[in-house]
Amino acid sequence: MSDLQVQIFGTRKSKETRAAERFFKERKVKVHFVDLHERPISKGELTRFVQKYGLNALLDLEGKAYERSNLAYLRTTEDSVIAKVIETPELLKLPLVRGGKVLAVGDDAEKWKEMVGQGSA
């Protein structure tokens, strides 16, 4: 029995978020789900993902929210983009998943398996 826990940041509407939740629950991994509509991601938590992947890798560049935000056309600082992302979680490639020291962005089953593997070692 693993005492691995994962934290999933996402929204209930996101099918990728639901897939991540299902993936971990099927493997009996404790999931701490953070609905970004109820509780925005903290800047510190988001910064962890930004440091690992870079801000652009976290943005859903094909999404409607990104199109509406005009972020592609704005000359802005990383901090102001981060602030916008915190208030508009749809700008992110969801889910953001953290399991131990492993971080995953979007629908990344390979990284999820890595998290599960790390818990049973």
Image (tube, rainbow, N blue to C red):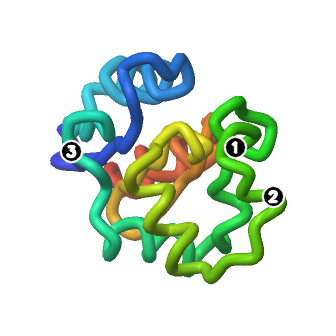
Provide the secondary structure element on which disc 3 rests.
loop
Secondary structure of residue under mark 1:
helix
Amino acid carrying label 3: it is: Arg
Secondary structure beneath dot 2 equals: loop
Image quadrant in which you'd find residue 75: bottom right
Q: Which mark is residue 72?
A: 2
> Residue tagged by mark 3?
39
The foreground one among 5 and 51 is 51
Which mark lies nearer to you, 1 or 3? 1
Three-letter amino acid code of the residue under disc 2: Ala
Indicate the quadrant containing the N terminus: top left, top right, bottom left or bottom right. top left
Task: Please tell me which of labels 2 and 3 falls first in the chain.
Answer: 3
Q: What residue is pinned by disc 1?
A: 66
Task: Note whether 33 is above or below 81 in the view shown.
Answer: above
Q: Residue at x 61, y 43 (%)?
A: 93
Which mark is first along the chain, 2 or 1?
1
Q: Earlier in the sequence, mark 1 or mark 3?
A: 3
Q: Is residue 31 visible?
A: no
Circle 1/circle 2 CB separation < 8 Å: yes
Q: How many marks?
A: 3
* Quadrant (top left/top right/bottom left/bottom right) for the C terminus: bottom left
The reply, left or right, for residue 103 in relation to residue 67 is: left
Q: Quick check: 45 above or below 105? A: below
